[in-house]
Image: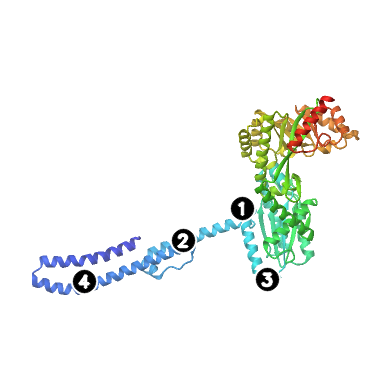
Amino acid sequence: MTSDMQSKRAAVLALICGVPLIAGALILFVPDDMAVHLLLLLFPCAAIAWGAAAHRLAQIDEGVEGAIAQLNAAEAGDLEARMAPATRRVTPELGQAIERLFARLRHDLSRSEQRAACDPVTGLASRAHFRMSAERLIDQAPAEMSAALFFVDLDRFKAINDSRGHACGDKVLAKVAERLRVVAAIGAGKDALIGRLAGDEFTLLCPHLDDPARVQAIGESIVATLGAPFAIDGASISVGASVGIALRPQHGTTLQELMAAADAAMYQSKASGRARVSRYDAQLAAELTDREKLDQDLRTAVRRQEFALVFQPQVSLCDGRLLVSEALLRWRHPTLGVRPAAEFLSRAELTGQMVAIGEWVLTAAANTAARWHREGHIGRLALNIGQQQIEDVAFFDRLGKVFARSGAPLDRLELELPEGVAMRCPAPALARLEELREAGVCITIDDFGAGDSNVQRLRALPVDRIKLDPVLIHEIARDSGARTILQALVGLVHGLGCEAVAEGVESDAQVDVLRVIGCDAVQGYAIARPMDDAMLQEWLGMFSARARAG
């Protein structure tokens, strides 16, 4: 309560309490006749004072109740509620304090809304604000209103983040935003909405745009503008972008429909070689429907665990022993049959299903390795791990716990990392791989020779084996140049202190060449195709018998 209110209440209470006290003093200390006359005069005055005091208290209560009502409205989200006149008139100090409080709250809320609406890196509309603004524009527009939605995805941004760091990446994103503003202003005017969806994805919505040539020109301008190098910290950095376009109302009338169509068109640009502009069409519509069906089927597959592991053997060229059985994921689709991982893993990653699938693979592999160990099955079980697992340090803890729970010793496990993943492996993951290696896990680099390898980096990695990519094996039986290159790579692998493994071996002639040039092990259709566990046991028995007979 303010001092103003306190003093007024005190004065009223003093008046109310003072009248009885004065009357009592008159009775005690004044002669009877005079006291009677004085009391007859005092009581009317007291009644008037009492009424005035009660009225004043009622006014104060009305002012306080008005303030409470305004505060309750603010609690419900209404910071614009008008102050009750009684609060301003009777309790001005309280009224002024509430007005200052509400003004500060409105200011802070406005700043918070501005920060939420604006992406802090680029200054463009944030994902949420872009969607809200675009949905409001589309929902309020007539159904026939034309518009073009451009979905822009940078082509080489991740490589910049990985090689130059996130600070440099943020500067590139800010430069991209500046160029997109220029393109939008020239091509679509001030009505265009630009937003950063996430990471390196941007959107541009241009209302009242229906000229196909103009739409195409804007898309090509985006590709050309973002394809030009950026000057960042004294370096020239090239990024590039792929663009997808959806038109309203041809490809959808809601923002969700337009976003899905433009996204599908953008992926078409990526698949066609990047740095391109693609417009949504009937073929993409069919592909989008197929993807939606695939996503739905995948969610069902995860829930029902419609997956299986098959195994492809890898044998030693020295003595023919089975060294490793590589675990490969398959989807037992209820209507399409057994599907290879290449047909669904990329969608699983995009839709967030990969984590659950990865956990299933990890558990199934651990249980299989434990059973092989109990049954005396020879050789290790190889498990492929990708970028998501490498970047998730907790993955290694889960791996150790799952194998410990299954009873499978870690020396029965081999982890295969694709060459590109190994080259970008972060320091925490390298440390965990080294710990697993010391515990008996074999570490292998897969697909070697298909990407950009750094020999110095290879020397620093905790690696035991290197698998040569099938593209290096394909021509060795009939091309001397291919044999020379492969022999040099095998020498490099041995120089690094690792075993050289050839994968994708399809003929006995290739096996003979690989044996001559010193390769340590082979894997491919020339040895065996992927098979389930029961068939692997049968194959192993026949293979061992042939090896003894030979």
Could you tell me if the residues under marks 3 and 4 are in contact, i.e. CB atoms within 8 Å? Answer: no
Q: Nearest the camera: 370 or 42?
A: 370
Who's the residue at 90% across and 35% down the image?
479
Instruction: Give the spatial CA distance, label 1 vs label 3.
Output: 33 Å
Instruction: Give the spatial CA distance, label 2 vs label 4.
Output: 43 Å
Q: Quadrant of residue 7?
A: bottom left
Earlier along the polypeptide chain: callout 2 or callout 4? 4
In front: mark 2 or mark 4?
Answer: 2
In the picture, the quarter occupied by the N terminus is bottom left
Under mark 1, the amino acid is: Pro
Residue linked to disc 3: 142
**x, y percent for residue 382:** 72, 34
Instruction: Give the spatial CA distance, label 3 vs label 4.
Output: 73 Å
In front: mark 1 or mark 3?
Answer: 3
Query: Residue 46 got which mark?
Result: 4
Residue linked to disc 1: 120
Earlier along the polypeptide chain: callout 1 or callout 3? 1
